[in-house]
Amino acid sequence: MLKPSSYYLRNPDIIAVGTAGCYLFIDPRGMVFPFTTSSTAAWSVLLQELMQPMDGETFRARLAGLAKADTEISLSMLENGLLLTGANQDALCERRAAILTDNQAYHLEHREPVCEHLVVAVTGSIVAGLMAPAILSLAFCGHQRQLDLILTETALKFTTRNFFESYGIRTWVNPFERRDGINVAHVSLGGSANCILVMPATANALCRIADGACTDLLGLTVAATTAPVVLIPAMNAAMWNSAAVQRNAARLRDDGMYVVEPSLIFKATSVTEGNTMYGGPGTLWRGPLGLMQTVSAVRAHKQNRSPMHANSARLGADADGRERTHQIWPCAGIAARQMSAR
Ligand SMILES: Cc1cc2nc3c(=O)[nH]c(=O)nc-3n(C[C@H](O)[C@H](O)[C@H](O)COP(=O)(O)O)c2cc1C
């Protein structure tokens, strides 16, 4: 029950991923909470608003415009710690501010691969260079048997190929480049990838991918794959909330791609001011482990659109009286280990 005088905040440790008709919420233990909704675009806006404490009355009013099932989603989120609640805003803001200090850059524990081939693409956002710890963690911990890194031409303004190649990570920029017996990079990478992770994803990259534009190696590879594509947008709040970017994010979700909901990051263009902004890889507050859990969750979701193993909780019935089941399952491998370690 939402209390009018209480405040609610999206738990900053939760990764929210929107796709066609569904949101996946991934908690720090790697538990995945999939919620079916016909209002993904509305939830995207609401999840952004909930990065500020929202009072219960406003929250209820915001839900009133949505289906009954969406109110149930919010209650289930609350029950499962995906939403935090407090009597005043200050404690919630303090909790949120903890992500600015209590975040994890590296996760280097070596383990058996849970993914054969991961393609990561870095695009030309100001935070492109900040992806290095996550990418190095993916490589060092052996999350996948093969890692390929695509860098857009603009990404090279913010980071270098040499940096990643020095650590043995294979990088690609030009679609006509040939190496290691690979003659047509987009066909080879797109064909064998188990997942494509675009991190960070610029507004421009979202637009190209939503359009199916095959004007660079990233666009070509996404067009040439059947693997799940995970997009982690990073841009300032004005860009993210512009009509065109929101339209593209909605198109991408509707096309079955997985868009990670931005959360607060520092204002990267003027770090000294210490302001926060929307956009940025929300997952990275949880560090590379959160990223690996996201890849596992998305792969499982795309493979089955059903749970890997049922641990389901019947949470009620939808507007038509049909039973609606929300399922909760741990991610494969990594997340299961993380859970058992607790
Ligand atoms: C200093 C600077 C920082 C930028 N940061 C971002 C950003 O964070 N997010 C974004 O969407 N675009 C950003 N842009 C704009 C992109 O670099 C530009 O749209 C570019 O065409 C993206 O190319 P790509 O998507 O092929 O990498 C930035 C531009 C500049 C000059």
Image (tube, grey):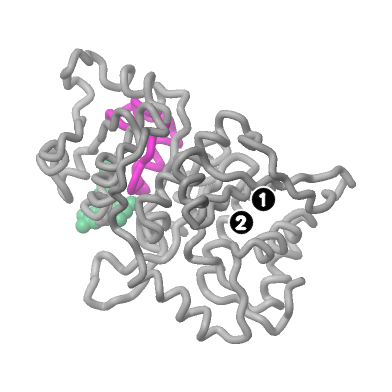
* Corner quadrant of residue 22: top right
Residue 252 shows in this picture = no
**Disc 2/disc 1 C-alpha distance (Å):** 6 Å
User: Which amino acid type is marked by label 1?
Assistant: Ser
Dot 1 beta carbon under 8 Å from ligand 1: no
Q: From the top left corner, tell me how far across and down residue 56 is, in percent.
A: 69, 77
Horizontal side of 20 relative to 222 (left or right) equals: right
Instruction: Give the percent coordinates (x, y) of residue 119.
Output: 33, 32
Q: Residue furthest right?
A: 321
| Residue 243 point in image, percent of width and height | 49, 54
Residue depicted at 88% across the width and 45% down the height: 320
Residue 23, numbered label: none
Question: Which residue matches tag 1?
Answer: 39
**Magenta residue span:** 195-222
Secondary structure at badge 1 equals loop
Which of the two residues, 25 or 272, is positioned nearer the viewer here? 25
Q: Is residue 216 magenta?
A: yes
Task: Name the residue carrying label 2.
Answer: 43
Disc 2 residue type? Trp
Q: Position of residue 304 (x, y in %)?
A: 61, 30
The residue positioned 41% from the left and 25% from the top of the image is: 223
Look at the picture and state if 139 lies above or below 184. Answer: below
Residue 92 lies, with reference to residue 202, above or below; the image says below
